Image: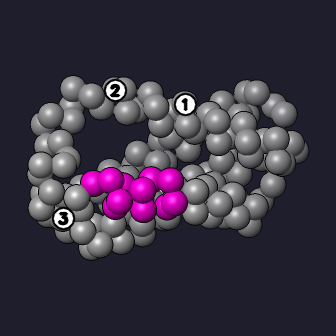
Amino acid sequence: MNLTRVLVAAVAAFVAYFILGGAIFTSPAMRAEFARYGIVYRTQESMKSVMPLGMLGMLLSMIALAILFAMIHPVGAGVVAGLQFGLLIAVYALGSFVLHNHVNLNIGWRLTTAQAVAYTVEWLVVGVVISLVYRA
């Protein structure tokens, strides 16, 4: 396992996650859907004070994922392995986060489905980014 490549892959995945997430979750349709559950979710303004903590959490998560990928593929792997890895992470996130939140939060199926699609896309991209950067 190459620690430098792991860290660079983690940072690249972190950047990709936030760029893609920013594009998806700030779209008018997603903003409108989140607004329907204002009692459950923070406003954009109130998120600003806790965003650094969330970013730290995601960076730590990306480091963990990059290490896992490197443990599975010590010499690196291609796009297909990245997609497979991303899909496994997406399935994990769907079960442990999206569906779990649907049970715990008073949100509807429309928002749950939108989050499922958005996070699946994000995790697929993260898997590919980790694979391509770790391999380089």
Quadrant assignment, res 50: top left
Image location (x, y in percent) of residue 47: 21, 35
Q: Which residue is mark 2?
A: 52
Q: Is residue 71 magenta?
A: no
Could you tell me residue 124's position as x and y percent?
A: 57, 61
Mark identifier at residue 114: none
Vertical arrangement, residue 110 with respect to residue 106, above or below: below
State left or right for residue 94 relative to residue 133: left
Mark 2 or 3, nearer chain start: 3
| Residue 30 seen | no
Circle 2/circle 3 CB separation < 8 Å? no
Badge 2 element: helix
Report the front residue among 92 and 131: 92
Q: Which residues are magenta?
A: 94-105
The amino acid pointed to by label 3 is Glu
> Which is closer to the viewer, label 2 or label 3?
3
Q: Dot 3 corresponds to which residue?
A: 33
Cβ atoms at labels 2 and 1 below 8 Å apart: no
Q: Residues within 10 Å of mark 1 (few under 14, many from 20)?
A: some
Residue name at image x 66 percent, y 30 percent? 7
Quarter residue 66 falls in? top right
Tell me if I can see residue 129 in this picture: yes
Q: Nearer the viewer, residue 9 or 94?
A: 94
Mark 1 — residue?
Answer: 60
**Which residue is located at x 39 percent, y 49 percent?**
19
